[in-house]
Amino acid sequence: MLSDEKLAQLRGALEEERSQLQQQLAALGGSSEGGPEFDENFADSAQVAAEQGENRSLAASLQEQLEEVDHALAKFTDGSYGLCEVSGEPIPEARLEAMPATRVRVEHAQS
C-alpha cells in the first residue's frame, strides 16, 4: 500500500502534468476548429493542409493524455488510485512513479 506521502507526491505530479497538457492544448488553439489559424491565401496550400493535420493529430493526442490524467485524479477522490482496473490488485509503486496515470499492472497492459 502506498504511503500518504507517496500518494501526495503522485497526485502533485498528475496535477502538474494536467496543467502542462492544458497549456499545450491552449497554445494550439486559435481557430474554431481547435488549431492555429493559417493564411488561406498562402501559396503552398499542401503545406498548410499538412500542418493543420499535424496540429489536429497533436491536439488529439494531448487531449487523450489529459483525459487519462483526469481519470487518474478522479480515482484519488473515490479511493481507487493505485489499484489495477483489471485485477483490483495494487499497482507497484515503481510503475506508478514511471506512469502516474496508469490504469493497470504491467501484466495487463496492452502491448
Image (tube, rainbow, N blue to C red):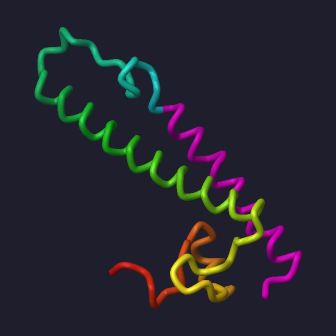
Q: Is residue 52 above or below residue 81?
A: above
| Residue 35 image offset from top left, x and y in percent | 38, 28
Q: Quadrant of the C terminus?
A: bottom left
Q: Main secondary structure of the magenta part?
A: helix
Image-based side of 58 in relation to 29, left or right: left
In the image, residue 52 lies in the stretch drawn in magenta = no
Residue 84 occupies which quadrant of the picture? Answer: bottom right
Q: Is residue 35 above or below residue 25?
A: above
Residue 4 occupies which quadrant of the picture? Answer: bottom right
Image-based side of 2 in relation to 13, left or right: right
Q: Is residue 29 above or below residue 11?
A: above
Residue 51 occupies which quadrant of the picture? Answer: top left
| Residue 2 image offset from top left, x and y in percent | 79, 83
Q: Is residue 66 above or below residue 84?
A: above
| Residue 39 image offset from top left, x and y in percent | 27, 13
| Residue at the spot 45% in from the left edge and 90% down from the top edge | 107
